[in-house]
Structure formats: C-alpha cells, structure tokens
Image (tube, grey):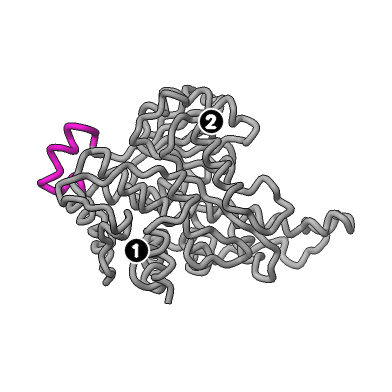
C-alpha cells in the first residue's frame, strides 16, 4: 500500500508491496505540493546560506540536517500508513454484516487517534493525518503540557490529561522527549485499554548512535522495557538505522512534511520495504503492523476465517493481485485453528524482536 495510498502491503512480490505502500501515502487524486513553482529569492546568495557562518568542525556535522529531515519524514509517512490500514480495517468491519453488530456492541466504529506531545514532530504528524487520511479532526485528541498556548485546527481537541487520552484512544502516538519517558509511562500505566495500539517515537533511534548496526537483543531489551513501563504489550516502535550516504540530501528537498507526502520521489525513498537516502527500517516493523491488524480482530472475538477475509479485503480494495494471507502466514503451521476460533493475541514485542512465521513470509516474498 505505498504507491497509491502509501500502498505497501505484504503480498507476493516486493513490487506489489511497493505499489501498495505508495498509493496509501499519496492518493492518485491528492493535490500536488503548493510549494512547487515557488522561487527561492535567496538562491545564489551564499552569504545567507546556513553554511556561511559554520566553522570547519561544524561543517562536518552538516549531514545531520538531512538525517533529521529524513527521520521526520519517514516517521510521519509510516505513522500515516499505519493509521490508514487501521482505519480501513475499521471501515470494512463497519460494512460487514456479519461483524457489524458485534463490533458496534464492543467498540465505537470510528478510529480514535491520540497524540501525546505537540512539539515539532507532533505538529507535523497532526497535519499529515488531517491532510493525507480521511480521519476527521473530531477523531483526533491531543495531550500537551500547554494546551492554551497551542493552535490546532478546528475540531481537534487539545488538553493536558495523558490518562484521559490513553483511555480514549484506539491508536496513541508518543511524540514526547526521551527525558519525559518515565513520567509518561507512569501516567499511562494501567490506563491503556488492551486494544489501544501505542506507536512510540520516543526510542525510534538507537541509543548508541555511534554504531551503524543495532543488535536484536538490544532492540528486544528496549521493547520489553517500554512495554513493562507501560504495562502494555500492544506497542509498535519503528527502529530506524541511519548512515551517511551520497543520496541523503534528497530529504532536504521539502519544507513541509504534509506537502512533501505528495512527492513521488520521497514516497519511493520512504517505502519501508526498500528505503533509500541512508535510512532503513527492519522487516520486523512490517510484521508488527500486520500483527496489529490481527490483534484488532482478535479483540472483538472474530473467527480466524473472518479475520483473514477482512485483512485481505484491505489489500483487495486497492486492486492488488496478491496471494492472500492465511493462518500459516501468522502462526506456526503446527497450530490448528478452527475457522470460527479467534487468532491468539500476539505480543508486538515478540513480533518485532523474534523470528515469526510472518517474517519468514515477508522475507520469502522478495523477488
């Protein structure tokens, strides 16, 4: 689901997945960037450039600008992608006659999105969700320390009550600073509903920034620690790897993330299955996203047959010719599951840190 609506699903071929991801991020009928055609009046005036007053040592760190821009863009793009998938699943659930009454009795049908923290990342994410998804402002609430000082679009509710936000949200984005992690986890602990998908940006970059690789056990420790602090295992966390490369400057070509999501070259570069520009994202994140959809269906006690039909329907609606996901795609083939029996609840900590049947499926789908 990454080429047509940020369309990048886990299907049979990587080409198919790439098209799916791109469609999700940049719908065919979405407007082009308003920044196109504008002229930079400072172009050619090197004395006004950022580099003009930098020392030799400071210029060695100029690559961090591209890294920062790339992580911000990819973080927002992938978050929007997840929201689109969850929102699509909820819409299908609402339309399905077999699931409609059950779903309505257990949970409201509209997706509720919470954003905890309204710094630069939180604001960019908010604009992206409003401009690039069909989520309405009334479906988004924000908790921030100074709500009276923030200007948010009409319809978006802004307040300072982390616990209230946690109890309300279906998807909760943590956009606060790492230094606030202990206090935030203390606020949220025991207040998150089981079905609430927590999407954490807090530890999105490895703690050891001086290493080019990040071992699986270190990621497992970080994930487990965050889950334990929250008292909640339904946590999705993008783990980006960054390195200096010749193409990293492509991330500097935008000034507004929401508008940049209409740029095909940036969408292609941020596709989670084939990222470019010096940033990569492990396939475990893709598995975590799909297991999240599975858990949403499990939470309302849908049978495995109905669950698979609904998840496959998300990709079928995008006109993708894919091999459908089956029981063995998600759980061990030795596990017998009756069509009317729900899938087991999957810990996203395990899904993102261990080898799973779905990871095997995704890896084998590469051309």
Of residue 49 and residue 299, the one placed in the foreground of this image is 299
Residue 313 lies in the magenta stretch:
no
Q: Position of residue 235 (x, y in %)?
A: 45, 41
Q: Residue at x 36, y 62 (%)?
A: 9
Q: Position of residue 138 (x, y in %)?
A: 34, 35
Of residue 8 and residue 139, the one placed in the foreground of this image is 8
Please name the predominant secondary structure of the magenta segment in the image.
helix
Q: Position of residue 129 (x, y in %)?
A: 42, 47
Q: Is residue 298 above or below residue 72?
A: above
Image quadrant holding the N terminus, namely bottom left
Q: Is residue 231 above or below residue 5?
A: above
> Looking at the rendered structure, which numbered label has been put on residue 150?
2
Which portion, as a residue range, is magenta? 93-108
Residues at circles 2 and 1 in contact by the CB criterion of under 8 Å: no
> Looking at the rendered structure, which numbered label has been put on residue 62?
none
Q: Position of residue 266 (x, y in %)?
A: 53, 65
Mark 2 to mark 1: distance in Å?
A: 31 Å
Q: Local crowd at mark 2 within 10 Å, few (<14), some, or many (≥20)?
A: some
Q: Residue furthest right?
A: 56
Res 337 seen here: yes
Quadrant in the picture for residue 171? top left
In primary-sequence order, the first of circles 2 and 1 is: 1
Q: Residue at x 23, y 38 (%)?
A: 300
The residue that mark 1 highlights is 29
Q: Residue furthest left?
A: 97
Left/right placement of residue 94 relative to residue 280 reads: left
Res 30 seen here: no
Q: Residue at x 24, y 62 (%)?
A: 317
């Amino acid at each position: 689901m990454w080429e047509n609506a940020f369309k990048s699903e886990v299907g049979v071929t990587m080409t198919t997945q790439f098209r799916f991801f791109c469609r999700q991020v940049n719908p065919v009928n979405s407007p082009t960037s308003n920044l196109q055609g504008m002229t930079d009046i400072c172009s050619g005036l090197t004395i006004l450039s950022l580099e003009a007053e930098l020392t030799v040592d400071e210029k060695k760190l100029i690559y961090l600008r591209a890294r920062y821009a790339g992580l911000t863009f990819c973080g927002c793009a992938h978050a929007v992608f997840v929201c689109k998938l969850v929102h699509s699943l909820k819409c299908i659930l609402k339309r399905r006659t077999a699931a409609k009454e059950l779903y309505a009795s257990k949970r409201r049908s509209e997706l509720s999105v919470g954003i905890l923290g309204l710094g630069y990342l939180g604001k960019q994410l908010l604009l992206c969700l409003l401009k690039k998804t069909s989520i309405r402002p009334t479906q988004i609430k924000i908790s921030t320390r100074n709500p009276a000082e923030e200007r948010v679009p009409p319809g978006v509710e802004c307040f300072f009550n982390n616990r209230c936000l946690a109890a309300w949200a279906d998807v909760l984005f943590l956009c606060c600073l790492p230094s606030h992690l202990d206090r935030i986890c203390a606020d949220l602990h025991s207040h998150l509903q089981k079905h609430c998908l927590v999407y954490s940006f807090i530890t999105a970059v490895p703690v050891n920034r001086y290493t080019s690789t990040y071992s699986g056990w270190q990621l497992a420790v970080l994930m487990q620690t965050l889950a334990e602090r929250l008292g909640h295992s339904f946590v999705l966390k993008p783990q980006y790897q960054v390195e200096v490369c010749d193409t990293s400057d492509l991330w500097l070509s935008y000034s507004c993330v929401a508008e940049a999501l209409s740029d095909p070259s940036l969408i292609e570069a941020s596709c989670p299955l084939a990222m470019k520009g010096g940033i990569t994202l492990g396939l475990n994140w893709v598995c975590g996203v799909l297991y999240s959809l599975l858990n949403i269906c499990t939470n309302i006690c849908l049978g495995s047959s109905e669950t698979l039909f609904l998840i496959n329907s998300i990709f079928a609606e995008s006109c993708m010719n894919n091999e459908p996901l089956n029981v063995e795609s998600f759980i061990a083939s030795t596990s017998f599951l009756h069509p009317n029996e729900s899938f087991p609840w999957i810990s996203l900590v395990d899904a993102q840190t261990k080898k799973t049947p779905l990871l095997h499926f995704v890896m084998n789908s590469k051309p």
